[in-house]
């Protein structure tokens, strides 16, 4: 597996400025070019249009859906938990309760050498509403006042990492 994602970074729109968005998109592009479906063990993962709620990829073989989370920091924290930021709280809960269940792909990358460190998978049967923790809503003075994000939190045993 090619762990370099320099080509993926070159495909990200040049007018984007936010580093987390740039690297998140590059990791999604890398997944579609280099990673096979962990559910059916071989289907290609098609990258879907940006901003489809809760879903970034779909397997062309088994039709499983995936959301990709990218981080330059390890997902496994010192206490052994796996914690990372999600999207809008209510939207995430609603998508979890819908017919369109999804799996998570966690991508840890090294920004300095543009390499993927490791990839983890959390299958949909391990994702419950208890794993989705609401964050404090944005203050009334914020640009998106009242918006409420969420965090995901899991025990490390539900994540399957490959180096």
Image: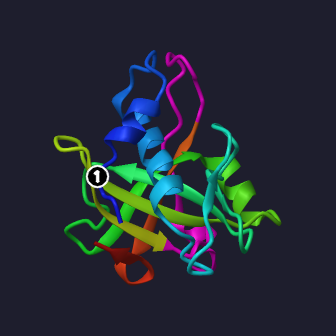
Between residues 73 and 5, which one lies in front from this camera angle? 5
Residue 23 in view (yes/no)? no
Q: Which residues are magenta?
A: 122-147
Residue 158 seen anywhere in this rendered image of the structure: yes
- Describe residue 53's horizontal placement relative to residue 157 as left or right: right
Residue beneath the point at 69% across and 46% down: 53
Residue at 69% across, 69% down: 64
The residue indicated by pointer 1 is 109
Please report the residue visible at 56 percent of the width from the left and 45 percent of the height from the top. 87
Image position of 159 with respect to 141: above or below? below
Is the residue 155 above or below the residue 142 in the image?
Answer: below
| Model colouring | rainbow
Residue 108, percent from left and from top: 31, 57
Which residue ends up furthest to the bottom in the rendered image?
A: 157
The vertical placement of 80 against 133, above or below, is below
Foreground: 53 or 62?
Answer: 62
- Tell me: residue 128, above or below residue 5: below
Q: Residue at x 50, y 25 (%)?
A: 139
- Between 3 and 137, the one lying in front of the other is 3
Does 124 appear in magenta? yes
- Quarter of the figure with the N terminus: bottom left
Magenta stretch containing residue 135, yes or no? yes
Residue 138, horizontal then vertical, whole percent: 51, 30
Identify the secondary structure beneath mark 1: strand
Quarter of the image where one finds residue 17: top left
Q: Quadrant of residue 18?
A: top left
Specify few, some or many for label 1: CA neighbours under 10 Å numbering under 14, 14-19, or 20 or more: many
Residue 43: image location, x then y, percent: 62, 71
Q: Which quarter of the image is occupied by the C terminus?
A: bottom left
């Amino acid at each position: 597996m090619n762990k370099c994602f320099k080509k993926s970074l070159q495909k990200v729109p040049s007018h984007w400025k936010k580093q987390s968005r740039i690297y998140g998109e590059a990791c999604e592009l890398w997944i579609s070019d280099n990673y096979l479906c962990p559910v059916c063990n071989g289907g290609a993962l098609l990258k879907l249009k940006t901003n489809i709620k809760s879903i970034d990829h779909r397997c062309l073989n088994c039709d499983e859906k995936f959301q990709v989370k990218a981080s330059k920091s390890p997902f496994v924290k010192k206490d052994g938990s796996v914690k990372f930021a999600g999207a809008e709280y209510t939207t995430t809960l609603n998508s979890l309760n819908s017919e369109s269940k999804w799996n998570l792909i966690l991508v840890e990358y090294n920004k300095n050498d543009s390499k993927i460190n490791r990839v983890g998978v959390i299958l949909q049967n391990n994702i419950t509403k208890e794993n989705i923790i609401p964050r404090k809503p944005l203050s009334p003075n914020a640009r998106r006042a009242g918006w409420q994000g969420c965090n995901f939190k899991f025990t490390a045993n539900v994540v399957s990492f490959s180096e």
